[in-house]
Amino acid sequence: MSRSTGRRLGRAGIRDVAAAAGVSITTVSDALNGKGRLPDATRSHVREVADRLGYRPSAAARTLRTGKSGLLGLTVTTYGDEPFTFTEFAYFAEMARAATSAALARGYALVILPATSRHDVWSNVALDGTVVIDPADGDPVVTELVRHGIPVVSDGRPGGALPVTGWVDNDHEAAVLGLLDHLADAGARRIGLLTGNTTDTYTRLSTTAYLHWCERVGQDPVYESYPAHDPCAGAVAADRLLARPDRPDAVYGLFDPNGTDLLAAARRYGLRVPEDLLLVCCSESTLYAATEPPVTTLSLKPRRIGTAVVQILIDAIEGLDNGRPVEQVIPTDLIVRASSQRRPPRTTVSPPRGPSGD
Amino acid sequence: MSRSTGRRLGRAGIRDVAAAAGVSITTVSDALNGKGRLPDATRSHVREVADRLGYRPSAAARTLRTGKSGLLGLTVTTYGDEPFTFTEFAYFAEMARAATSAALARGYALVILPATSRHDVWSNVALDGTVVIDPADGDPVVTELVRHGIPVVSDGRPGGALPVTGWVDNDHEAAVLGLLDHLADAGARRIGLLTGNTTDTYTRLSTTAYLHWCERVGQDPVYESYPAHDPCAGAVAADRLLARPDRPDAVYGLFDPNGTDLLAAARRYGLRVPEDLLLVCCSESTLYAATEPPVTTLSLKPRRIGTAVVQILIDAIEGLDNGRPVEQVIPTDLIVRASSQRRPPRTTVSPPRGPSGD
DNA sequence: CCACCATGCAGAAACGTACCTCCTCACCAC
DNA sequence: GTGGTGAGGAGGTACGTTTCTGCATGGTGG
């Protein structure tokens, strides 16, 4: 019994197209992929027959043959017990969205894979490269990927001398220092910090930058740290911070929800913002433009980071890089709103608050 | 030159493991996959050798052979011109996160694919099935996927008689009606709506439910619609709604940012919430627990939806379903806070409420 | 002692594509 | 006529698995 005849059970294959078009498999492949030396007549004829048969090349076969799958992993490290903290905050959502768009524009797609998943999941999908968000020091997944020759680009400086292909990050120290200066310029005498107790690079760098700044200006550090993955813990920590005897007159919150947490805590203690308490938090949420008062936010530019990470990764995959690791620093953006200015820029139509002296 | 010898350029293959273990390829495959009839001694020996060589089976080859890739598409339809509105709001983020976890728990991974991407992207990845979020009526991508025999489960009732494998959705009409009753019970005389001008099912069903309710209770509809994908348009629309001569004394906002938009607009017009204006908005954000005042939100339970969608899809892929479409309705959850109660429950000094369980 | 069966394993055929190697013309210059 | 050349296309192999089929071997019942 001939193996090339008989009803195709599944989809039409390249063989069927070749047979229907009266040409060879090679010709079909070349015509559809724009390779080889073929007259336009043959090319369009093959294309037409393929369309008519509803032919879709098998991604698996192509991947097996070429070694390229067109898939990039998007790995998120987990915090605490949460199985998967993807998009816990707006940052991840924005970053993932930008990365997806950028990848798509270059013909790649993103596969979401948590760093903690077991081997079988990782090896069940053929990856051309991987984006790792905020890898832990000496992350075993990253090291294994690199050992297998898969390009890895991380969002956030990799700790523990991870041999990644490249990374993209903000200059967190500079951002924090600039923001603290901004608060000091606005009149802050004692600036507090709401931070996390996790060991990720972002938290660590930001916290040490704060400590250095305190040392430089001779202020005693005033901070509370909490498990950032717990949505309630932030509110409690904000409360603790404002309940301290050495209560700060300005606070920077490292995480997205800290702004509302601190606003709520301030209300509970009868503190007016910004008159009694200056506020800045790191967030990508547009909600802070419409709070009372609007809150000054530090944006880490996740869109730019997501885009940059993917570009670097794909360049490395396609051999467009020079072979050396690429390190790219994305500037942050301090969006100044009423919460960090003693004199509100323009407080709406409603009756202005008490004419607080400058 | 022998083809089976020579230095393997890439990773070790199953052949190398077989050679190193002194068994046949079949034995290696069986040992590693727990099939065939092999004594435990052989099995563990093979496994050990494979580990030593750092053997990882080729996902592409396995997919080609078995026809299953272990990949599920996660498709998001786009709004307006935005290339990709994935996770524009917290809903998508939560939903995607839950779907990813659920898929992973059953050995699948999710690939993010916008519905608008061209064919080449879709056919470049072997999908076992696809989750479609809020498909447009007669979505061409969905119809094509179904034609190719790929199971499709949608988040949101599919319009246009799309022949999907199943769908999961909230009962949006019931949710809106219940919520309007809640506002009426709290004393609302004229309830306004802030809605979108897009044609997606959620917006459409919610709006018509509102109109029906108005008809039933004999209230003139008071609503403003705006392009939901534009973050600024919401604030403007909220302002318009409260600037109307027939200003409502209660408002329901269909989209996540509407809560803060409406709070800000209320402040501009000197309206107190909830005394002068009752407020509810549809949101998954925990930020509304800490606004001033806290805002009552309608949760669509994206976690449960994401999980359910994936379960249905995988059941269909693995033939665990009965072959008929599965339709599942997830109840919504009205989280009542101060903004929708004339008498604020308790304006305490104590730290805010505990975790918002699923 | 032979047929029989379960056990343990090997051979080899696919899966569908890409691409390298070659073949066959027709045409032209010499 | 002959060799060269370039266009147009065919054959066949390899990518790395899974799995069907089959072949030994040793133990067991008749």
Image (cartoon, coloured by chain):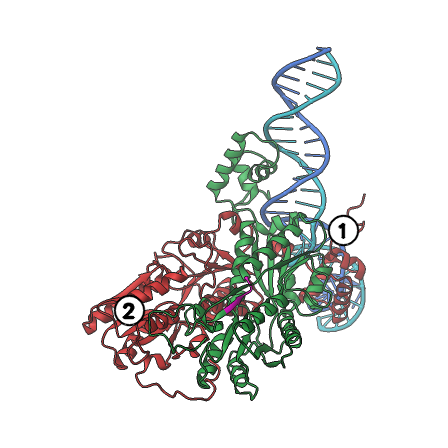
Chain colours: A green, B red, C blue, D cyan
Q: Is residue B284 visible?
A: yes
Query: What is the number of callouts on the image?
Result: 2
- Residue B237 lies left or right of residue A193; in this view the side is left
Left or right of A182? Residue B336 is left
The extreme front residue here reads A357
Residue A300 falls inside the magenta stretch: yes
* Residue at the disc numbered 1: B9
Asked whether the beta carbons under mark 2 and mark 1 sit within 8 Å of each other, the answer is no
Compared with A49, A126 (above or below) is: below
Residue indicated by mark 2: B242
Between A110 and C12, the one nearer to me in the picture: A110
Residue visible at 70% across and 60% down?
A164
- Helix, strand or loop status at disc 2: helix
Q: Which quadrant, please, contains the N terminus of chain A?
A: top right
Q: Please provide the residue range marked out in magenta.
A: A297-301
Give me the residue at 71% from left, 60% from top.
A146
Residue A127 can be seen in this image: no
Q: Position of residue B341 (x, y in %)?
A: 32, 82
Q: Position of residue B252 (x, y in %)?
A: 32, 71
Q: Chain of mark 2?
A: B
Q: Nearer the viewer, mark 2 or mark 1?
A: 2
Q: Is residue A211 above or below residue B323?
A: below
| Chain of the residue displaying label 1 | B
Main SS of the magenta segment?
A: strand
Disc 1 residue type? Leu
